[in-house]
Image: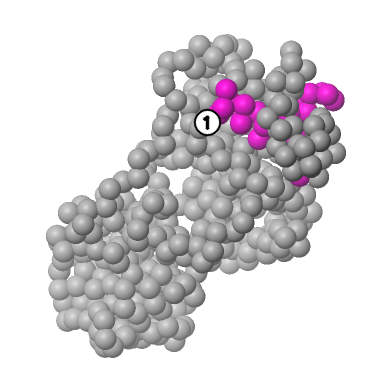
Amino acid sequence: MLNAVAIEIRPPLAAVVAAKSALVVRPVLPLERAMRGETTFGEPGAEASAEELMTAVAQRRDRKAFVRLFETFGPRVKAYLIRQGADRASAEDLAQDVMLAVWRRAAQFDRSKAAVSTWVFTIARNRRIDILRRARRPEIDPEDPALVPEPEEPADRVVEATQRRECLHAAVEELPEEQARLLRLAYFEDKSHSVIAEELALPLGTVKSRLRLAMGKLRTALETME
Amino acid sequence: MMPEHHPGDDLLIAYAAGSQDEPVALVVATHLALCPRCRNEVERLEELGGVLLEEQEAEALGEDSLERVLGRLDEAAPEAPEPPARVPASVDPRVPRPLRDYLGAGLEKLDWTSYRGLDKAELLQEVPGFRTRLMRIKSGTAMPAHTHEGTELTLVLAGGFSDEHGHFLRGDVAEADAATDHRPVADPGEDCLCLAVTDAPLRLTGPFGRLLNPFLRI
Ligand SMILES: [Zn+2]
């Protein structure tokens, strides 16, 4: 079944590659994908990236592709919600809701802008604020005429989003444990930085400066890549 | 013109993580509307959220979880992107979303109170532990020196002000804490309009509570 999915997903991508390489039709090699920094899933021979799976869901309402996204992200979204303070039953229900939203909003997924993991994270985060916190999340409106636009739109970002994701992943691994731990606390526990500082028996200033240090390293990693 | 004073990394991280209270998130998000640099930063920080989400340990879903979700796939039509909200012609261009959504009928219809060259209007009063205010300071007005208890964030929407820490114009965010002692002066020319949020502890509010903003302490 997994192989069938991979085959289903290949044609559109192969077409893209072909267009870029003097119309020579050839299969996409795993190495190429790795060079683009895309996530690969499953066994050898079935390595569709999350971005390809999501594109298959968006364009063809591909249920098999959705099942694989569900199996990868569903349990992680549930873990995220539990760490954010949801009990197991609500975490289970909310994780299902989040994955349903992934299916329903698939058409809005833009792989040139974000990796699938980023997109799932923002959906899970917003759902949590909405349901667990019962609060509004103030967000910009990209269509607002009062929004100050980017000086110039960066050119082709298709490759960038997934590459950046891979680069960030590597950079997080490189962080000193105390900084990585703090980042995880900041992202996964619904606590203010002062509460985190209290719990770690650290001055708030130390928490902030460690977060700043971590950010500096991640920024440098991304800049080196670009 | 791009802002020069940005919210600190810790504020951007907390915004991307979604761990801030609404008033603070409102200041950050309204700054984002005026600052492409920080919009980019927040996009990167959301990517970081995705990376951390992927690498964390999974929590097994219920046995019937997949089946239940698959059973609901056809339940609703795919969610279409929301149509862009229509901007009423009367909207003040100085106030971008999301702040605009908090103003009801508009800036002028707010419940303003005035005191010595300073007008203020309360927003988000239902959120405990915070004071969220729009402030309008008459151009050229100097305020008495004061210190803060608690943290205060001020986002300039129009005009500007200066204090010991710099010159703040549209889009700039000033962060002040207990260590800050300053004497802000509104720029001459245009009146200074800003959004100020303090996380003053509740004991400081009430009829004799202090107003912790760069311009006035009552
Ligand atoms: Zn900024």
Looking at the rendering, the stretch of residues picked out in magenta corresponds to: A36-60
Its colouring scheme is one colour
| Res. A84 visible in picture | no
Q: Position of residue A80 (x, y in %)?
A: 58, 35
Q: Position of residue A108 (x, y in %)?
A: 50, 36
Q: Amino acid at mark 1?
A: Ala
Q: Residues within 10 Å of mark 1 (few under 14, many from 20)?
A: many
Quadrant where the N terminus of chain A sits is top right
Q: Could you say which is closer to the camera, residue B209 or residue A16?
A: A16
Identify residue for label 1. Answer: A106
Q: Residue at x 62, y 26 (%)?
A: A56
Q: Is residue A12 magenta?
A: no
Q: Could you say which is closer to the camera, residue A34 or residue B176?
A: A34
Q: Residue at x 53, y 51 (%)?
A: B16
- Chain letter of the residue carrying label 1: A
Q: Position of residue B74 (x, y in %)?
A: 46, 15
Residue A145 against residue B5 in the figure, above or below = above
Q: Secondary structure at mark 1?
A: helix
Q: Is residue A59 magenta?
A: yes
Q: Is residue A146 left or right of residue B8?
A: left
